[in-house]
Image (cartoon, rainbow, N blue to C red):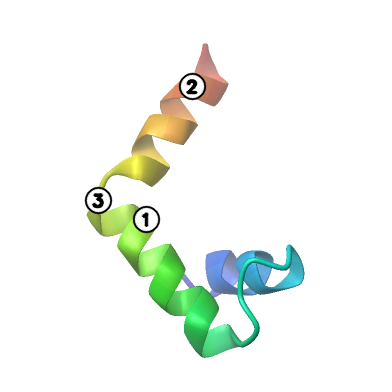
Amino acid sequence: MLNAAAGIMVGGKATSLKEGYSLAKESVDSLSALKVLKGIQK
């Protein structure tokens, strides 16, 4: 989760690691991360 948070922050979607972590957790909890992963696998 910390790697995802750092990626979100470096990508400009968050201004801090804490904010990036919250966004990463939200993505995982809502299953949107899984949907993106499945789309990449196709």
Kindly identify the amino acid type of the residue bearing the numbered disc 1: Ser
Which residue position holds label 3? 30
Residue 12 is situated, as x and y percent measured from the top left of the image, at 72, 68
Which residue position holds label 1? 27
At 75% from the left edge and 70% from the top edge, which residue is drawn? Answer: 10
Q: What SS does tag 2 mark?
A: helix
Kindly identify the amino acid type of the residue bearing the numbered disc 2: Gly
Q: What SS does tag 3 mark?
A: loop
Residue 9 is situated, as x and y percent measured from the top left of the image, at 66, 74
At 55% from the left edge and 72% from the top edge, which residue is drawn? Answer: 5
At 35% from the left edge and 67% from the top edge, which residue is drawn? Answer: 25
Query: How far is the residue under mark 3 from the one under mark 2?
Result: 16 Å
Which image quadrant is residue 40 in? top right
- Of residues 22 and 1, the one nearer the viewer is 22
Which image quadrant is residue 4 in? bottom right
Apparent side of residue 31 relative to residue 20 in the rendered image (left or right): left
Which image quadrant is residue 8 in? bottom right
Mark 2 is surrounded, within 10 Å at the Cα level, by few (under 14), some (14 to 19) or many (20 or more) other residues, namely few
- Of residues 3 and 11, the one nearer the viewer is 11
Query: How far is the residue under mark 2 from the one under mark 1?
Result: 15 Å
At 50% from the left edge and 88% from the top edge, which residue is drawn? Answer: 18
Residue occupying the far top of the picture: 42
Say above or below: 21 vs 18.
above
Which residue position holds label 2? 39
Say above or below: 26 vs 34.
below
Residue 37 is situated, as x and y percent measured from the top left of the image, at 47, 33
Kindly identify the amino acid type of the residue bearing the numbered disc 3: Ser
